[in-house]
Each structure stands twice: as C-alpha cells, then as structure tokens.
C-alpha cells in the first residue's frame, strides 16, 4: 500500500507490489527483452547503416530511475 501525496486527500491510497518485487520483475523483463532481441538479430540479415542516432542499450538502472 502506498500513500500518494499528489492525489486528492480522499483518494491517496494505491495498492502496488513492494519495491523488491518491482525490481525483480523489471530485472526479469529486461533479461527476456535482451534474449528476444538477440534471437531476432540472429534471424535477420545485417541492417543498412543509418545516419541517425545510435540505439541506446536499456539497463536496469535506467528502468529504476
């Protein structure tokens, strides 16, 4: 249970998972995302080089901010 101060006084309580459980869910989703990206990359021929920005690698630290 979490009290959100920015909400109206009579509607501030939200039920959510614990911080530890949230970190574990995010860690597992990130690992699964990396696995799927690797398998998709292995199936596709090399992509043409673009002149745009490089893709940023998503890390657990970025998700937890």
Image (cartoon, rainbow, N blue to C red):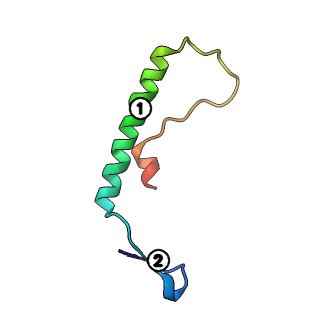
Return the x and y of residue 7 as percentages of the image width and height.
Answer: 54, 80
As helix, strand or loop, the secondary structure at mark 2 comes to: loop
Which residue is pictured at 40% across the width and 40% down the height? 30
Mark pair 2, 1: CA separation: 33 Å
Q: Residue furthest top?
A: 45
Q: Residue at x 57, y 31 (%)?
A: 55
Q: Residue at x 42, y 22 (%)?
A: 39
Q: Quadrant of residue 1?
A: bottom left
Q: Is residue 43 left or right of residue 20?
A: right
Residue depicted at 49% across the width and 35% down the height: 57
Crowd class of label 2 (few under 14; some 14 to 19; many from 20; radius 10 Å): few
Q: Is residue 61 above or below residue 10?
A: above
Location of residue 45 by image quarter: top right
The answer to whether residue 9 is left or right of residue 31 is: right
Disc ID at residue 53: none
Residue 27 % position (x, y): 34, 45
- For label 2, the residue is 4
| CB atoms of marks 2 and 1 within 8 Å | no
How many labels, in total?
Answer: 2
Q: What x and y, as percent, mark residue 46?
A: 56, 12
Residue that numbered label 1 is attached to: 34
Q: Position of residue 15 (x, y in %)?
A: 38, 71
Mark 2 vs 1, N-terminal side: 2
């Amino acid at each position: 249970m979490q009290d959100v101060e920015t909400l109206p006084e009579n509607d501030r309580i939200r039920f959510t998972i614990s911080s530890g459980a949230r970190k574990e869910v995010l860690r597992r989703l990130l690992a699964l995302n990396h696995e799927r990206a690797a398998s998709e990359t292995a199936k596709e021929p090399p992509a043409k080089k673009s002149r745009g920005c490089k893709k940023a690698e998503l890390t657990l630290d970025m998700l937890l901010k």
